[in-house]
Image (cartoon, helix red, strand yellow):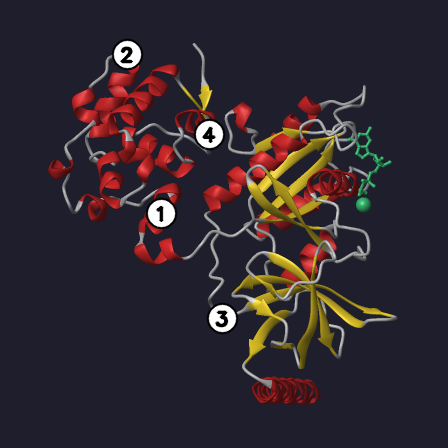
Amino acid sequence: MSKVRIYTLAKELGVDNHKMLEILDGLGVSYKSVSSTIEEDTVELIKQIVEEEGAAVTGGGSEPDQAARTEPEQAPVEVQAAVQSGTVLSGTLEPAPGQLPVEGRATEAQPRPSEVAVQEVSAAAAQEIPHRAPVVTIMGHVDHGKTSLLDYIRKTKVAAKEAGGITQHVGAFEAKTSKGRIVFIDTPGHEAFTTIRARGANVADIAIIVIAADDSLMPQTREAIAHAQAAKVPMIIAINKIDLAQADPEKVKTDLTQLNLVPEEYGGDLIVVPVSARSGEGVEDLLEYISLTAELEDLRADPKGQFSGVVIEGKVDKQAGVLATVMVQEGTLHVGDFLVVGENYGKIKAMTDSGGARIKEAGPSTPVQILGFSDVPTSGDKVQSAKNEHAAREVIAQRASDRRDEEDARQRRKAQRSLEDIL
Ligand code: GDP
Ligand code: MG
């Protein structure tokens, strides 16, 4: 019996992944992720549903949305039985929209995460907030191929800028793929991730854990996994160096299961992609899995909202002065905007994108290099905008005063403790 992956079927039927999971939920079919496989019988049922719903399923309107959602208590059991016996109870599968209990949603017990996402999507407010590109970080043990993988993606997926544009290292780059934009944090290693996290910010939406197929799990691999788990960032495992004769990807998968990370082909929900940063094999698949994961995460940001961002990197350039790479997370940055970082502020004199091209504005999930700060900001610092210079000064004055109050309080506590010690 042939099995089909959920996302493959979704693609084949021209239905988006959310919708596909919704249909599966309606059928009471369990799955771990979009890369889980489903039985042939179920595939047939889904094809039938999609066919019968026609435009309704692909249309994504709110009424068809409900039609696709079968009655939660009874339908799954019956359909499950139908799936097992091989018979098709089409009557159960296509209730007339009018027959659906209106309060069906409200009476549902704990919705699955995918359902929550679907519900959020269908909320009118969320629909107005556009999707944004995923921001990806690459972590793993030294020499397992992080830099090589980033280089390969950059070489093949970043359109070369015209001569004259100075390509500087900015700490991030944007790859254009058939599935849309993917932003890579280009300072591999845990430091970038942990320093940013230690300052209370989270830049990465997805973590790629690179594991060399000839070396398997190493101490820094485990650390990287722990970091991603602590940050609750979805992980994708890239088993690298599969071009090597001594490559043993199966061992990597088995070793992962010992950490309770079960690859989906072993029945778990961990996405594992074999790649070679040398030959490029599997890299396209990796990008596709990144896009799939991003789609499920339903990443959105409002370009018209209040600006907020995070410093990826700050440095002093001998000619230009202080340069800061900032990831735009919400809102849009414009040349001339006033920004506040920690207890410093600056006015954007010039902005370049990660390819070195001058830009005037930058929306969500865009890494930009900014000229205009007087002090070098630290990676992980949050960046906010201010209406004007006066407002910017006020914000930092307040921050400085808060910090002094906090320091005073700490001194007092320390003095109190030493007094207690003496007594
Ligand atoms: P990093 O420390 O994780 O950034 O690892 P690097 O990207 O610097 O790679 C370490 C070494 O492994 C270098 O000599 C690379 O050429 C080599 N390497 C990286 N990826 C591959 C690969 O897919 N296949 C092979 N054969 N070698 C690789
Ligand atoms: Mg490296």
| Amino acid identity at mark 1 | Val
Amino acid type shown at disc 4 = Tyr
Q: Which mark sits nearer the N-terminus, 4 or 2?
A: 4
- The N terminus lies in quadrant: top left
Look at the numbered disc 3 and say if its residue's Cβ is closer than 8 Å to ligand 2.
no
Q: Is residue 128 above or below residue 345?
A: above
Residue receiving disc 4: 7
Q: Name which residue lies at 14% across and 33% down.
A: 96
Distance from the alpha carbon under mark 3 to that under mark 1: 26 Å
Other residues around mark 3 within 10 Å, as few (<14) / some (14–19) / many (≥20): some
First along the sequence among labels 3 and 4: 4
Camera-side mark, 3 or 1: 3
Question: Along the line of sight, which residue is nearer the eye, 315 or 131?
Answer: 131
Q: Residues within 10 Å of mark 4 (few under 14, many from 20)?
A: many
User: Which type of secondary structure does the marked residue at label 1 adopt?
Assistant: helix
Disc 4 and disc 2: Cα gap in Å? 23 Å
Residue 313 found in image quarter: bottom right
Residue 22 image position (x, y, % from top left): 33, 36
Could you tell which of marks 1 and 2 lies nearer the N-terminus?
2
**Residue, disc 2:** 86
Circle nearer the viewer, 3 or 4: 3
Q: Mark 1 sits on what residue?
A: 116
Q: CA distance from mark 3 to mark 4?
A: 35 Å
Quarter of the image where ligand 2 sits: top right
Question: Residue 12 at what x, y percent from top left?
Answer: 43, 24
For disc 1, the neighbor class at 10 Å (few under 14, some 14 to 19, many from 20) is few
Q: Which residue is mark 3?
A: 306
Q: Amino acid at mark 2?
A: Gly
Judged from the image, the secondary structure of the residue bearing numbered disc 2 is loop
